[in-house]
Amino acid sequence: MTLEDLGYHHDIEAMGIAHKLQGFETGRIMAEHKERYIVGTACGECEAAITGNMRFTAASREDFPAVGDWVALTTYESGNALIHHVYPRSSVLRRQLPGSPGEAQIIAANIDIALLVQAAGRDFNINRLERYLTICHSSGVRPLIVLSKTDLCDRQRINEIRDALLARVRDVPVIPLSNATGEGIDDLLALIEKGKTHCLLGSSGVGKSSLLNRLAGQNIMKTGDISQTTQKGKHVTSHRELIILGNGAILIDNPGMREIGLTDEASGLETTFDNIIRLSVHCRYSDCSHTSETGCAVTSAVEKGEISPQAYDNFLKMQRETAHYEATSAQKRQKDKSLSKLIKHYKRFDP
């Protein structure tokens, strides 16, 4: 294994020089297991932990390494290593941390292309897909929609899904495929690029692990049996992991995500719902909420059938969600700032 196999290029080297990291080894986070990391380096893989200083100075979980990160580390003869710094990220896929309002969780870092996997059966949900698209657009990650398990559906169902996607999703390739029969796999492989980092995103049971095995040409990930009742596979991936495919492409597998809470994805919403944003400039009021105002170009377009009511409702829901996240996050930052000031005050006068 070389660093180039892991996606290393001149821009990363330049970042290391700019941040004075030449005295450390360079590696890439390949897997995380409860704050123990598997790091790929020029000398192979090693197990690593972060330094105490890095843990102490971290403002949030986002300052910790994530799968896909480039890191500066020191390796030891024992085979273990210490991570000192995380290189600046070129892109970050993140979601709201489940159960923790105002906090974000990094899904993966330094991603070029996201494979958004949805099964063609009853689990297909275009509202959820728009959430994934918004996360990608806000991060500068190119999305690619993978419609899996087409062998479980008839041609009419697949055509219905294609029509629904064409009506609500613009300029994103859609690849129907079957892991069971292999149909569509070559079409997807033609879009997977050597040296680029790809990330699999989707709910549990949509066939991500089976797809990874197909793309890799070997059984890397365990796969679950298909339920005859729900037509879903069992959730088998328990952690994020970076894998190098035979064609030189890099792929990060992820556990299925039931919750895809948005963070501050305003720019992503503008791209995902660009038709709504374009219409909004014609609203009578500049601060139009697109709900009940007179002269709203958006609600008028919905009434005329120019915008899907489902897309409109999803846009409003996600817009409210991002606004709530921003407000909650701001409150949390203010509380943390106040607590920090209080600690410094007591330290100053502590005998």
Image (cartoon, rainbow, N blue to C red):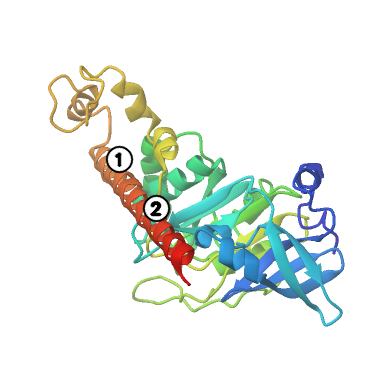
| Residue 342 percent across, percent down from the top left | 39, 61
Q: Is residue 262 left or right of residue 302?
A: right
Give 243 or 19, whichever is nearer the viewer: 19
Identity of the residue furthest to the bottom in this view: 78
Whether residue 124 can be seen here: no
Number of residues whose C-alpha sits closer than 10 Å to that of mark 1, classed few (under 14), some (14–19) or many (20 or more): many
- Point 39% across, 46% down: residue: 130
Q: Earlier in the sequence, mark 1 or mark 2?
A: 1
| Residue 331 percent across, percent down from the top left | 32, 52
Whether residue 2 can be seen here: yes
**Residue that numbered label 2 is attached to:** 333
Please tell me whether mark 2 sits on a helix, a strand or a loop.
helix
Q: Is residue 258 left or right of residue 215?
A: left
**Residue that numbered label 1 is attached to:** 315
Identity of the residue furthest to the front in this view: 351
Q: Which mark is residue 342?
A: none
Give 161 or 33, whichever is nearer the viewer: 33
- Point 41% across, 71% down: residue: 232
Give 182 or 131, whichever is nearer the viewer: 131
- Point 26% across, 37% down: residue: 312
Which quadrant holds residue 306?
top left
| Residue 159 percent across, percent down from the top left | 41, 46
Residue type of the residue flagged with mark 1? Phe
Number of residues whose C-alpha sits closer than 10 Å to that of mark 2, classed few (under 14), some (14–19) or many (20 or more): few
Point out the image quarter for the N terminus.
bottom right
Q: Nearer the viewer, mark 1 or mark 2?
A: 2
